[in-house]
Amino acid sequence: MPESPSAPTGSQAAPSISDEDAKLVVLARSARARIGAAEGAAVRDQDGRTYAGANVALPSLTLTALQLAVASAVASGATRLEAAAVVTEASTLDGAGHAVVRDLATDAPVHVAAPDGTLLGTVLQ
């Protein structure tokens, strides 16, 4: 699946984010650090509940961190997302993770951060 452009080339950079969205970055960093994953993600649903996950790479199952976080949200009854965050070493937001967020929200910001929590940008489309 094609990758979505990283913040500097294809989306609008956000100089700062709300406190609620900053919490998503913290949750995503924690999910990543917990298992030493390449990527961690967190989402917030329409009721303000949060879900976090790290990428999964098994012989029979591969999920991006955003796919896992969104799947957890949907399995808990979420029907809409307010925001998402992904912490990654990659220079781009993967297309599969981006697509699954868009399945539940066409307008939810997807904040992309470096492993140290530095905000790289926000994908709005």
Image (tube, grey):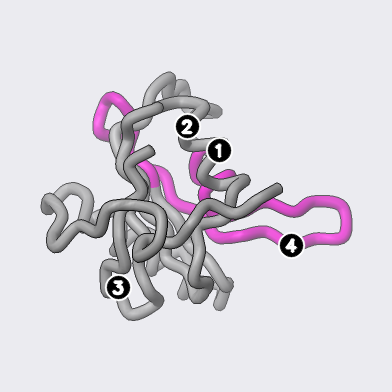
Looking at this view, name the residue that lies furthest to the right: 59
Q: Earlier in the sequence, mark 3 or mark 1?
A: 1
Q: Which is more foreground, mark 3 or mark 2?
A: 2
Given residues 49 and 24, the one toward you in this image is 24
On screen, residue 43 above or below 9: above
Cβ–Cβ under 8 Å for marks 4 and 3: no
Of residues 92 and 25, which is closer to you in this image?
92
Q: Which residues are magenta?
A: 43-70
Q: Position of residue 28 (x, y in %)?
A: 39, 60
Amino acid marked by disc 3: Gly
Q: Check disc 3 and report the residue beneath it.
A: 117
Asked if one can make out residue 65 in the rendered structure from this viewpoint, the answer is: yes
**Disc 3 element:** loop
Q: Quadrant of residue 57?
A: bottom right
Q: Earlier in the sequence, mark 3 or mark 2?
A: 2
Q: Are marks 2 and 1 in contact (CB under 8 Å)?
A: yes
Location of mark 4 (residue):
57
Q: Quadrant of the C terminus?
A: top left
